[in-house]
Image: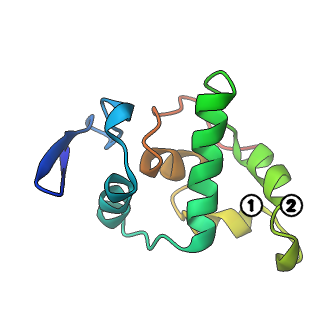
């Protein structure tokens, strides 16, 4: 599998995860999101950037949904109640897995968030 981005072929594994995470860019993220049928809202970008920051600056950490909810409760203070549903609005196939794919991170092998 691969993605065509700005005339360049970006290689991905059979599940659509980037083979080389250094090829990631916002344009690559948009191409992956398009293939997933995802419209990248401002909050979706916040989730993507949080996952990338955790992975690259916290020893390869890939937060599960529970940890993502905990983080965004402190960030999305204008939203009222922040729960897993708040994340699934942006990534319906699972915020931890689908957002990680769009963020150019390796596929996580764990099950759901709870």
Query: Which label's residue is closer to the chain start, 2 or 1?
Result: 2
* Residue closer to the observer: 78 or 63: 78
Indicate the position of residue 39 as horizontal and vertical percent values.
44, 74
Query: Which residue: 52% across, 52% down?
Result: 99
Indicate the position of residue 93 as horizontal and vertical percent values.
51, 58
Asked whether the residues under the numbered discs 2 and 1 touch, taking CB atoms below 8 Å apart as contact, a structural biologist would say no
Indicate the position of residue 37 as horizontal and vertical percent values.
36, 69
Look at discs 2 and 1 and give the one toward the viewer.
2
Read off the residue under disc 1: 84
Q: How is the image coloured?
A: rainbow
Query: Which residue: 70% across, 41% down?
Result: 64
User: In this view, which residue lies farthest toward the left?
Assistant: 7
Label 1: how many residues lie within 10 Å, few (<14), some (14-19) or many (20+)?
some
Q: Which mark is residue 73?
A: 2
**Secondary structure under the numbered disc 1 in the rendered image:** helix
Query: Which residue: 29% across, 62% down?
Result: 35
* Residue closer to the observer: 109 or 99: 99
Q: Is residue 1 visible?
A: no
When the figure is inspected, residue 108 is found, relative to residue 75, above or below; the finding is above
Label 2: how many residues lie within 10 Å, few (<14), some (14-19) or many (20+)?
some
Q: CA distance from mark 2 to mark 1?
A: 10 Å
Query: Which residue: 59% across, 51% down?
Result: 49
Indicate the position of residue 50 as horizontal and vertical percent values.
65, 48
The quadrant of the rendering that contains the N terminus is top left
**Secondary structure under the numbered disc 2 in the rendered image:** helix
């Amino acid at each position: 599998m691969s993605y065509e981005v700005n005339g360049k072929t970006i290689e991905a594994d059979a599940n659509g995860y980037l083979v080389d995470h250094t090829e990631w860019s916002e344009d690559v993220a948009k191409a992956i999101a398009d293939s997933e049928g995802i419209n990248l809202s401002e909050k979706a970008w916040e989730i993507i950037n949080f996952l990338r920051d955790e992975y690259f600056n916290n020893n390869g950490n890939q937060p599960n949904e529970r940890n993502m909810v905990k983080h965004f409760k402190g960030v999305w203070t204008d939203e009222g109640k922040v729960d897993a549903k708040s994340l699934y609005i942006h990534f319906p196939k699972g915020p931890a897995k689908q957002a990680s794919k769009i963020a150019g991170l390796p596929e996580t092998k764990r099950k759901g968030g709870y």
